[in-house]
Image: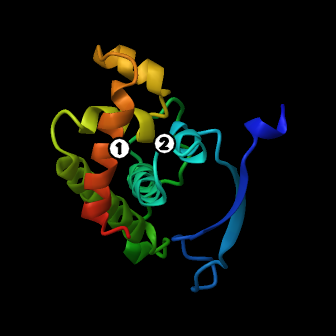
Amino acid sequence: MTDQARLLVERSIEQGIASGRGGFASPRSVTMNMAESPLGWLFARGHVNQRQYDAGERLRWDWERAQLAPHVTMAWDAAPVARGRGGTTYGSDLVDVQIDAKRRFDGAIAAAGPGLSDILWRIVCAGEGMRDAETALGWPARAGKLVLTLALDRVAAYYKVR
């Protein structure tokens, strides 16, 4: 792999799951390869600006937090335990986080509007490349980039990204 194919950036991540001692786990950071996602690729080459990129990342974060992606394997999460029987108490908080993330995601997609949300979802959430998304939508080459930037601008306004 060449240096041009790897655009490494250090990012902090938030942990919303309570630690076993009643507090929250300490913040962590991860190294991301910005060239891996189609949106990161577009940003690294100047096709989307910082505001549009941040809006797309917020949308993807809500998509992942709401767990809207299809599951391909068995869910190995612990079975929920009744509160009155000494079980964990943060399970309902996780459900609330999912519901809030889904509400934000649905609002952002609605803000993008019909026709714009298709390319937005394909590039940002599903991780399709621009050429594949344009082909799937029956669009001419290079039309997707313009439509995506319009959708990202609307999503940035929804999330109030500066």
Badge 2: few (under 14), some or many (20 or more) residues near its Cα, within 10 Å? some
Q: Give the residue number, with chain letter if any, for mark 1.
A: 149
Asked if residue 42 can be seen in this view, the reply is yes
Residue picked out by circle 2: 47
* Quadrant for the N terminus in the image: top right
Q: Earlier in the sequence, mark 2 or mark 1?
A: 2
The colour scheme is rainbow
Quarter of the figure that contains the C terminus: bottom left
What amino acid is found at the position of numbered circle 2 in the picture?
Answer: His
Quarter of the image for residue 145 reads top left
Q: Secondary structure at mark 1?
A: helix
Residue depicted at x 84% and y 33%: 2
Judge by depth and name the residue closer to the eye, 151 or 18. 151
Amino acid under label 1? Answer: Thr
Position of residue 47 relative to residue 77, above or below, is: above
Residue, x 59% and y 42% (percent of image)?
Answer: 45
Residue plotted at (43% across, 66% down):
91
* Residue 146, percent from left and from top: 33, 36
For label 2, the SS is loop
